Amino acid sequence: MQRNILTGSILALLTARAAAPQSPQVPTAIASIRQADLERDMYALAGDNMRGREAGTLDEMRASAWLAEQMRKIGVSPKGEDGGWYQWWNMRRTRVSSTTSSIKLGDRAFGLWTDITPTSNVAAEVTAPTVFVSNLNDSTFDVRGKVAVIRLAPPASSAIRTTTNTYEHNYTRAALIPMAALGRWGALAVVVVADSIAELAVEAVARTQMRGTYDVVGGVPRFTRNPAAARAANVRPPVPVLLVHRGALSDWKTDGQTVTIELRTETFETPSVNVIGEVRGTDARLRDEYVVFSSHQDHDGVRYPVNGDSIWNGADDNASTSVALLAIARAWVKQPSKRSALFIFHGAEERGLLGSRYHVAHPVVPLDRIVAVLNGDMIGRNHPDTAALLGSQPPHRNSAALVQMALEANGATGRFVIDSLWDRPTHPEGWYFRSDHVPYAERSVPSLFFSTNLHPDYHTPRDEPKNINYPKLTRMTQWMYMTGWIAGNATTRPPVDAGFVLR
Ligand SMILES: [Zn+2]
């Protein structure tokens, strides 16, 4: 599917390039953006010793401190709170409690996350007999008031996600969805026995699920644009759906056994952080307006191993843009624009755009002084000459003038064929809505999202520094830099399109 999309998009963009405007003057400071620096910084930030930079852990803190230290060395000024580099805030995390939850079959206790895995964050107290349901589509089974036991059935292949995690994990997740029907038919809990494919993913589901869900204290809501989507995202299965190993079928199959389920959830807060630096503008009239270069420093941390590697490095996602921001800062301190530039590394993007949702609610400069947010996420992979510019076409475009600046910058630097399909509202990945520019765009700050899109290593331990295309990353960095340079020096700031509402 991805190959088809790419072919189609190249065609779509050849037309767009024909209308590309003339090249503006590229400042000499662009020479400070060096491939060797990007590569060195990438191996530092996405190397195994950063342990995947998981949000809310010391690993994210270590990466954040490293970024602040690089900015200090480059000559950027701190623009966080209290004169420092950091803007602190709390993640609110909700998960099934491992210490106060228990599940028993008869007198036999099962190990939570090892023998049996809750597949959602649902609290429950159930004591009920089992009933084995041999076929989900057979409505003659009476599951009311019982714990339904069922074998996992293969999902439709179209329901299996392909762009993240492993095939077995995605297969299992897709297969679990229809099982919630048993709860609607009156079962108090559902025990799903893995098949041979899901058996390979039991540990992965447990390791993902035990993390729970995340929110940001004091941030803007995630789904401002679409309350219906918010309600859908918050719908929890009404009963626990529990995954057990394939070999446990014989234990669970007999009807009438007593199951005792005590599942309790716990909520707690842990700190995460945005790292913010500034290069002041040169023009006394314009320097209180800001161009924002935006990235996120977190990734998925240390998780279950894939081919023996348990560190999810997040080289493309999103060390790529983070090191790009450092390179842009090197050029910017040499030759600042008339307007000021902010370099913002948002924490906990992977947990639901938490850092940008916090900063938009507590911006270090007034939001209406930000003339452009240039956000990048995953800018170092795929075909060397294609890239996406999300927010460049309706309904996502919120400033035609800023898009024009980015196209001019592309003509002068990166010269990418722009893949326009990923910015369409019909694109199956909904890619536009999956990074830190969204909370800004929703509040009518002119915003763009630079990306080289998904690839098979996305959110796996294979997203490593050695798989980055460094010449391409260098060109993407130059493109973001040049877009900011044009916006930072334009006589008039790029206006928001009349009547823009993000949807
Ligand atoms: Zn990302």
Image (spheres, rainbow, N blue to C red):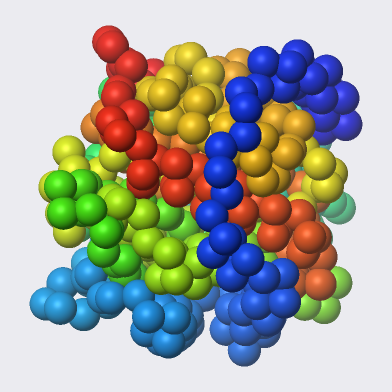
Which quarter of the rendering shows the N terminus? top right
Count of numbered labels shown in the rendering: 0
- Compared across the picture, whether 384 is left or right of 230 comes to right
Residue occupying image coordinates x 79% and y 60%: 471
Residue occupying image coordinates x 27% and y 59%: 282
- Compared across the picture, whether 31 is left or right of 274 comes to right
Please name whichever residue, 117 or 205, is drawn nearer the observer in this view of the structure: 205
Please name whichever residue, 268 or 148, is drawn nearer the observer in this view of the structure: 268
Which quarter of the rendering shows the C terminus? top left
- Compared across the picture, whether 386 is left or right of 352 comes to right
The image shows residue 271, relative to residue 477, as above or below, that is below
Residue occupying image coordinates x 22% and y 70%: 80
Q: Is residue 95 visible?
A: no
Residue occupying image coordinates x 74% and y 38%: 416
Residue 150 in the image: x percent, y percent? 68, 40
Residue 171 in the image: x percent, y percent? 75, 43
The image shows residue 418, relative to residue 172, as above or below, that is above
Residue 451 in the image: x percent, y percent? 62, 44
The image shows residue 447, relative to residue 116, as above or below, that is above
The image shows residue 358, relative to residue 430, as above or below, that is below
- Compared across the picture, whether 445 is left or right of 188 comes to left
Residue 377 in the image: x percent, y percent? 56, 51
Quarter where residue 337 is shown? bottom left
